[in-house]
Image (spheres, rainbow, N blue to C red):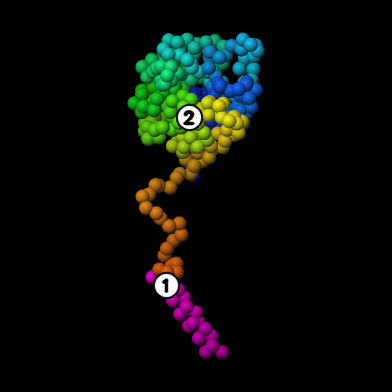
Amino acid sequence: MMEDRPLVLGEHSFRSRLVLGTGKYASLPLMRDCLEASGCEMVTVAVRRIGPDASTGESILDFIDRSRYTLLPNTAGCYTASDAIRAAHLARELALSDLVKLEVLGDSRTLLPDPVETLAATRELVKEGFTVLVYTSDDPVIARKLQDAGAASVMPAGSPIGSGCGIANPNNIRIILENLTVPVIVDAGVGTASDVTLAMELGVEGVLLNTGVALARDPLAMARAMRHAALAGRLAWLAGRIPRKLYAQASSPIDGTIGTAAGTEQQASGFRLQASEKQENKETR
């Protein structure tokens, strides 16, 4: 089996390959408990949600143990490169992290990324010294351009954000993996644990998800399921699956078994040998 290695993003190294989001939970204490149950080591937070809640005065950061988790500020809700760059600067000023998860959306209905604005923002943020993890579509051409622009990780969507449709186009993910050398992390669309396993079995370096846990019937149980799914998928990829074949192949070998010509002859030879040995024993007596 191949020897595993940690997930490395810029100057950061992670054992867990699951990244959890912090939105849509019924409460902040529930979010905190799900982060722990998932076993994740990196947590993504929308820069626009950093401030205290108007009704409670609590900040989302009050429920994230900074000594345990690496923060990944994201530019969710930005529709232009300039807005996303401004959000990244705010995260830097708040000393959240040198990492930034770049999202520049094309429209509010599909929440798919705008490739032109995303590429422009990536180039600028890399120039300014940010470690950019960039959300993109599953287009292999755009993925390669983002790597060439200096992205530390390219994060293709498995399917639209919050859709729960899983990995809609695994072939495109495979092509991206073939073309890129930076870590590829599937981002968005995960609905259940099997989606995480499938993504990891393709060979991606990690999976980022939020809605699949936050809106599950039992978020805590789903967080645990996602943790095990990531581990299982990674181990399966390292172990190497068997090739797919059109026709069946028996699990037990046929040669030498009862009912085959070779097997019948082998048995007959055995019987003849036993009879010969018995006859020799009688004669020596």
- Eyeballing the image, is 265 above or below 38? below
Dominant SS of magenta comes to helix
Q: Which residue is mark 1?
A: 264
- Give the residue displayed 56% in from the left and 30% down from the top: 216
Is label 1 in a helix, a strand or a loop?
helix
Q: Residue furthest front?
A: 217
Q: Position of residue 196 (x, y in %)?
A: 50, 34
- Give the residue displayed 43% in from the left and 10% down from the top: 82
Closer to the camera, 129 or 231? 231
| Number of the label disc, if any, that sits on residue 157 | none
C-alpha separation, residue under disc 1 versus residue under disc 2 = 56 Å
- Eyeballing the image, is 257 above or below 64? below
Q: Position of residue 191 (x, y in %)?
A: 50, 31
Q: Quadrant of residue 183?
A: top left
Question: Left or right: where does residue 227 sit relative to residue 139?
Answer: right
Q: Which residue is mark 2?
A: 164
Q: Position of residue 102 (x, y in %)?
A: 46, 18
Question: Left or right: where does residue 247 sit relative to residue 57?
Answer: left
Is label 2 in a helix, a strand or a loop?
loop
Compare marks 1 and 2 and give the one earlier in the sequence. 2
Q: Is residue 172 magenta?
A: no
Instruction: Please state, as top left, top right, bottom left or bottom right, where the C terminus lies in the image.
Output: bottom right
Q: Identify the amino acid type marked 1.
A: Thr
- Give the residue displayed 63% in from the left and 20% down from the top: 28
Q: Identify the amino acid type marked 2.
A: Gly
Q: Residues within 10 Å of mark 1 (few under 14, many from 20)?
A: some
Question: Left or right: where does residue 39 sit relative to residue 166?
Answer: right
Q: Position of residue 143 (x, y in %)?
A: 38, 25
- Give the residue displayed 37% in from the left and 32% down from the top: 172
Q: Quadrant of residue 146?
A: top left
Q: Is residue 269 magenta?
A: yes
Magenta range is: 261-285
